[in-house]
Amino acid sequence: MISSFLKALINLRNKVIRIIIIDDSVPNGSQEFRILPKIMVKRFLLTHAALLLVIIFLFMFTPLGGLLYSSQESEINKNLSAVVNRINALQDSLQARDQQLNQMQTIIRLSTDTSLVLNERLQSLRLYQEIQAKEELLESNNQDIISISSTGILSSSVLNELPVFPTSYPVKGIVSRSFEPELNHFGLDIAAREGANVQAIEDGTVVNISWTITNGYVLSIQHKGGYLSVYKHCRTITKEIGDVVVKGDVIASVGNAGTQSSASHLHVEIWKEGHPQDPELYFLK
């Protein structure tokens, strides 16, 4: 019925419509109205447009708008904060990886071997230890002599030799993730008790110690023959840059540090001349 009425108004939009109302209870109680449909439509549209403007004004310039958008803005801010945190973590991880690669490239480019470089603060002690070692060497049939002080191992004749592989794992535990270079996982994850001692896999010199959001404490040791071992997610570090270590020295402790760590474990990497190696091929089964 309403649609028929609207169609009639559209067809008669340019004509005057007479509406007569007759009241039978009153003599001559009839009333007549003249309506132009075109004007009625205009008034109807203007009324609704004015009402819409009033509603928009209320939501834009009164607290009612805040009630409508507060929940949406809160969700947007939450998602934005999560994205920013993820970007910061990725940036930190990339910077740490670039620093590590630059160090390895510098070592290879300069063809330097720092495995015999001692910490400067130990030079005087080294001289004293060498004198003692020579005296003891005459009494021990030319066997390898390892000199030890309260600060740790200072010098050893075995540092002149290439690493011997396969060797022992740096910590006792269970392998939880293998070498997966296609997924940017360039090492081996070993699940172990938090705080367990991490041992150097071979003789060498500490060339880098750092801390990142993604990896926690990271320690790198350069070995003879272009080898480099890296230990990540450590809780503590017991060595300093420049310290000489021999196989089996305690260099750190297992931790659960870094955003990429979901449980207590050690991540160990072995690099040769700047190329990542599968650590499982270098460890005794």
Image: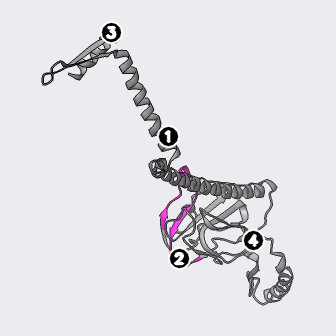
Cα–Cα gap, marks 2 and 4: 24 Å
Q: Are marks 4 and 1 in contact (CB under 8 Å)?
A: no
- Quadrant where the N terminus sits is top left
Amino acid found under the numbered disc labelled 1: Phe
Cα–Cα gap, marks 2 and 3: 92 Å
Q: Is residue 66 above or below residue 120?
A: above
Q: Is residue 163 above or below residue 82?
A: below
List x then y, in percent, for residue 139: 78, 90
Q: Earlier in the sequence, mark 2 or mark 4?
A: 2
Q: Earlier in the sequence, mark 4 or mark 1?
A: 1
Q: Nearer the viewer, mark 2 or mark 3?
A: 3
Q: Is residue 273 above or below residue 210?
A: above
Q: Earlier in the sequence, mark 1 or mark 2?
A: 1
Q: Is residue 168 above or below residue 10?
A: below
Q: Earlier in the sequence, mark 1 or mark 3?
A: 3
List x then y, in percent, for residue 235: 60, 74
Residue range highlighted in magenta: 175-197
Q: Nearer the viewer, mark 1 or mark 2?
A: 1
Say which residue appears at 30% left-offset and 11% top-offset.
11
Q: Are marks 2 and 3 in contact (CB under 8 Å)?
A: no
Cα–Cα gap, marks 4 and 3: 98 Å
Q: Nearer the viewer, mark 1 or mark 3?
A: 3
Check residue 233 in the rendering and tell me which mark sits there, or answer none.
Answer: none
In the rendered image, residue 34 lying in the magenta stretch gets the answer no
Q: Are marks 4 and 3 in contact (CB under 8 Å)?
A: no
Looking at the image, which is closer to me, 25 or 244? 25
Residue at which label 3 appears: 15
Q: Are marks 1 and 2 in contact (CB under 8 Å)?
A: no
Check residue 241 in the rendering and tell me which mark sits there, or answer none.
Answer: 4
Check residue 194 in the rendering and tell me which mark sits there, or answer none.
Answer: 2
Q: Secondary structure at mark 1?
A: helix
